Amino acid sequence: MGIVDRNTVESDRGATTVVEPNAVLRGGPSHLPEQQRVRYVPRTDENLKLPWRNGYQHFAPTTEHEQRDGTSLKVFVWERATKIAE
């Protein structure tokens, strides 16, 4: 199973499913748009490595939750950025 985009998951058989967001990303680059910050994360108990531009943005889960549109979202906070190795 893999993430196709922020709210779509692809199964091992190639089928895609739209899923509800379960996380919100706080901090990080100011150019990361709001629509990218509310997203589906497959493992809310693990760090998130988000491909962004020419590298990755790393976010860590917290114990906090935020309510948006009646949905409880796990809060992830920005830790660092890394470059893609060549």
Image (cartoon, grey):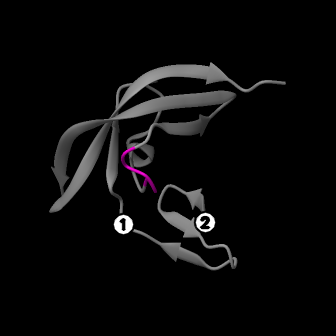
Residue at 60 percent of width and 35 percent of height: 52
**Image quarter of residue 69:** bottom left
Does residue 27 appear to the left or right of 15 in the view shown? left
Q: Which mark is residue 20?
A: 1
Of 59 and 33, the residue lying toward us: 59
Of 50 and 69, the residue lying toward us: 50
Residue at 18 percent of width and 46 percent of height: 66
Q: Residues within 10 Å of mark 1 (few under 14, many from 20)?
A: some
Tell me which amino acid carries mark 2: Met
Magenta range? 41-45
Does residue 48 appear to the left or right of 13 in the view shown? left
Residue at 67 percent of width and 73 percent of height: 12
16 to 62, vertically: above or below: below
Cα distance between the residues tagged 1 and 2 = 16 Å
Q: Is residue 84 magenta?
A: no
Task: Name the dominant secondary structure of the magenta segment.
Answer: loop
Q: Is residue 42 magenta?
A: yes
